C-alpha cells in the first residue's frame, strides 16, 4: 500500500513539474491590468534603457533608445534611435497595424517578413525574425519578444534571441512614456 502511494506522489509531482515547464501564452495574462495597447502606448515619445545578455548571462551590450510614434493612414509609424554603450548608433522604423481581434502586425527594414503579435491584458507577445549584423555577416535571428505594461507610463520588454534553435541570449528593456497623453487610435 505504501509503495502505491509513493508512485502516486511521484506521478503528481511529475505532472506539477511538467505544468510548470509549459510555454506561457499571451492569454495567460488576459486578467492583468493595466491593459496594453501597443498602438496607443507608442503614439508619442517613449524613452528606454536596456541591455543584451549572452547565453551565459553576461551583459555584453547596453543601450538607450529614443522612440517617436505617429498614427498615419491606419498604421503606427514608430521611429527608434539606439545609442549603444560602445558608441555605435542604429535606427529602425516600424510600421505597425492592428490585425483582427487583439493581433498586431509589424514590419521594419531589418525584420524578415512580418512580425506577428497578440495582446491580452497587460501583455504583448511578438514573434519575428531579425537580420542581425555580426562582423561582416548578417544572421537571421528568431526573436521571441514579450512586453508587459506595468503602469500607464512603464513597459518592460524581455526578448529571447535564438539562431537555428540555439539560444543566443536575451534583451531586457525598460520603457517610459514622456507625457501623459495617449493616442485614441481606434481606427
Image: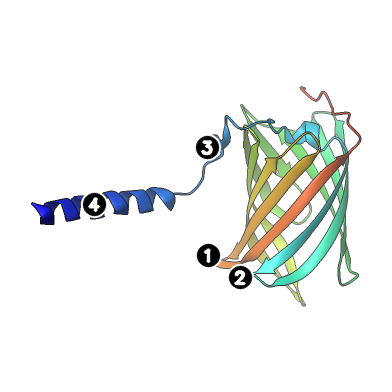
Q: Which residue is mark 4?
A: 9
Tell me where residue 152 appears, x and y as whole percent: 78, 33
Of the numbered discs 4 and 2, the one sitting upstream in the chain is 4
- Most distant residue in the front direction: 2
- In front: label 4 or label 2: 4
Q: Which residue is mark 3?
A: 28
Of the numbered discs 3 and 1, the one sitting upstream in the chain is 3
Distance from disc 3 to disc 4, alpha carbons, whole Å, reads: 27 Å
Tell me the crowding category of disc 2: few under 14, some 14 to 19, or many 20 or more residues within 10 angstroms, Cα based.
some
Q: Which residue is mark 2?
A: 55
Contact (CB < 8 A) between labels 2 and 1? no
Element at label 4: helix
Contact (CB < 8 A) between labels 4 and 1? no
Tell me the crowding category of disc 1: few under 14, some 14 to 19, or many 20 or more residues within 10 angstroms, Cα based.
few
**179 relative position to 186: left or right:** right
Element at label 1: loop
Total marks placed: 4
Q: Which residue is mark 1?
A: 165
Is residue 27 among what the camera can see? yes
Nearer to the camera, 143 or 1: 1
Contact (CB < 8 A) between labels 4 and 2? no
Of the numbered discs 4 and 1, the one sitting upstream in the chain is 4
At horizontal 57% and vertical 31% (from top left) the residue drawn is 30
Tell me where residue 183 appears, x and y as whole percent: 84, 27
- In front: label 4 or label 1: 4
Task: Please state, as top left, top right, bottom left or bottom right, where the C terminus lies in the image.
Answer: top right
Tell me the crowding category of disc 3: few under 14, some 14 to 19, or many 20 or more residues within 10 angstroms, Cα based.
few
Distance from disc 4 to disc 2, alpha carbons, whole Å, reads: 35 Å
**142 relative position to 183: left or right:** left
- Most distant residue in the left direction: 1
**1 relative position to 186: left or right:** left
Q: Is residue 158 above or below residue 45?
A: below
Amino acid at each position: 500500500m505504501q509503495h502505491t502511494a509513493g508512485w502516486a506522489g511521484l506521478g503528481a509531482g511529475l505532472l506539477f513539474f511538467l505544468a510548470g515547464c509549459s510555454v506561457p501564452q499571451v492569454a495567460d495574462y488576459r486578467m492583468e491590468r493595466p491593459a496594453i495597447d501597443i498602438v496607443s502606448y507608442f503614439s508619442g515619445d517613449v524613452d528606454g534603457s536596456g541591455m543584451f545578455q549572452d547565453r551565459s548571462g553576461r551583459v555584453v551590450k547596453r543601450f538607450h533608445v529614443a522612440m517617436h510614434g505617429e498614427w498615419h493612414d491606419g498604421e503606427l509609424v514608430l521611429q527608434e534611435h539606439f545609442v549603444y554603450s560602445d558608441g555605435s548608433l542604429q535606427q529602425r522604423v516600424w510600421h505597425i497595424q492592428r490585425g483582427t481581434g487583439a493581433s498586431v502586425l509589424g514590419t521594419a527594414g531589418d525584420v524578415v517578413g512580418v512580425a506577428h503579435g497578440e495582446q491580452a491584458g497587460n501583455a504583448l507577445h511578438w514573434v519575428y525574425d531579425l537580420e542581425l549584423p555580426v562582423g561582416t555577416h548578417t544572421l537571421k535571428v528568431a526573436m521571441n519578444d514579450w512586453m508587459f505594461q506595468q503602469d500607464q507610463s512603464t513597459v518592460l520588454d524581455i526578448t529571447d534571441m535564438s539562431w537555428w534553435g540555439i539560444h543566443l541570449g536575451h534583451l531586457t528593456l525598460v520603457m517610459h512614456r514622456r507625457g501623459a497623453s495617449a493616442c485614441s487610435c481606434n481606427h
